Amino acid sequence: MPLTKQTRTRTREKTDILIVNANELVTLAGNNQKPRVGKQMLDLGIIRNGAVAVKDGRIVAIGKTPEITKLYKAENTVNVGGKTVLPGFVDPHTHVVFAGSREDEFQMRIEGASHQEILDRGGGVQRIVRETRRASVEKLVDSSTERLNAMLEHGTTTAEAKSGYGLTTKDELKILEVIQRLNQLHPIDLVPTFLANAIPPEFSNNPEDFVRLIISEMIPKVAEKGHAEFCDVFCDRGAFNLDQSRRILVAGKNSGLKPKLHADETSALGGAELAASVGAVSGDQVLFSSDEGMKAMAEKGVVATLLPASAFNITNNRFADARSMINLGVPLALATDLNPNCYVENQQLIIALACHFMKLTVAEAITAATINAAHAVNRACELGSIELGKKADIIVLDVPNHKFLGYRFGVNLVDKVMKNGRLVVDKEAARTEFRLLEEQEM
Ligand code: ZN
């Protein structure tokens, strides 16, 4: 009867977009005030035949499809029948802004060249520093945009972005300005971090002078411009030692920059302990960290951001001991570590590596790449799960359930990406267009 239909239509609340018929709606809802640890990492909050209603860029309703469609209507209803819906991936550790590349060194490494040989032939991080210093803001925006596009197409909707290839006050500020511009131009939300990445050649004989420059000039200027939210240090042999790292992080903290740390990548220097003692939001890489260091991080709730691609790529297949960390109650996040020496934009591949080499379950890896990753960049109240009031950053994977992540790898499983309630990637629409074109030609 038409009257009944009208009445029903009138009572349904209008939203902008409805996503309906998800075979699995992976919400990760609930218990998200703190990063998840231990068994909490297994709880994906899956709704079968799920639906989400989105209005003004926010999630306004979640439930079973029949319930949601009874209560809500929308201009645009996206039927994702048979597919899997997740919160957009958060990539909490990237060096996405740089100029140049290191493919020749990759070849040399394959052929067995030592680190010293690579340096002798003008390679290493300093080559990227030289090219990044030479590059204009526009050029850096352009090259980084290409990488951000690849990240978005693979389902990343928020990413951290570090400076660190400038190593002069002017060039570090330039990179942070690039990050700010990208944040305005690109759908991916970027979380900016000032990184004390390396000691430049001009200070190789007096690294303490460089540390003083960072503390007395770079950090105050970065803080004054308001272009960074975090301060990070590469604490390792050949970079900054433990004491220098502590002083830099404390100076950053005093200027309002929250601490993060590249810790224990090539040896147990005490980086994890330092991350805990300065109250860092995350300790990253943590390949060789001691049990004491891990316990200290667990106690302080410091997220261990693991970077399996850089283990796969650089450190001769030594992977972080993720299972022990979970047993100790350390919250884990996963990141690409995208940089010229670990050129990967794809969080799906990171999940696959974490499952294959670190023995994370798929559920743990998904938690680490979504809600815990959001905690690692201080955004968990806004993103990382599909919950009422959060940003509608949602991805649709063209697979029947979440267990295909990691299992089916080497291809992009993303079908759609929604950022702030707007569809920014839609492969199905592109495929339909292609089909129509083919039909026209026939
Ligand atoms: Zn890094």
Image (cartoon, grey):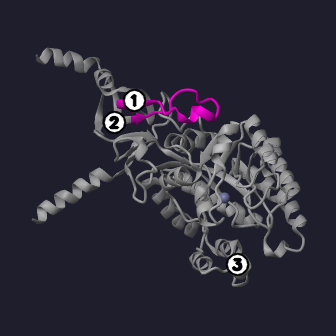
Mark 3 C-beta to ligand 1 under 8 Å: no
- Residue 361, image x, y percentages: 52, 43
From the image, tell me which residue sits under label 2.
22
* 43, above or below 71, in the image: below
Extreme residue in the bottom direction? 121
Instruction: Answer few, some or many: residues within 10 Å of disc 3's Cα (few below 14, many 20 plus, some between 14 and 19).
Output: few
Q: Which amino acid does label 2 sit on?
A: Ala
Q: Residue 319 carries which label?
A: none
Precedes in sequence: disc 2 or disc 3: 2
- In the rendered structure, the answer to whether residue 48 lies left or right of residue 199 reads left
Of 260 and 360, which appears nearest the observer? 360
Residue 33 belongs to magenta span: yes
- Residue 405, image x, y percentages: 44, 48
Q: Describe the element under mark 3 as helix, strand or loop.
A: loop
Stretch of the chain drawn in magenta = 25-54
Q: Which amino acid does label 1 sit on?
A: Ile
From the image, tell me which residue sits under label 3.
114
Instruction: Answer few, some or many: residues within 10 Å of disc 2's Cα (few below 14, many 20 plus, some between 14 and 19).
Output: many
**From mark 2 to mark 1, how far is it between C-alphas?**
8 Å
| Contact flag, marks 2 and 3 (Cβ < 8 Å) | no
From the image, tell me which residue sits under label 1.
47
**From mark 1 to mark 3, how far is it between C-alphas?**
51 Å
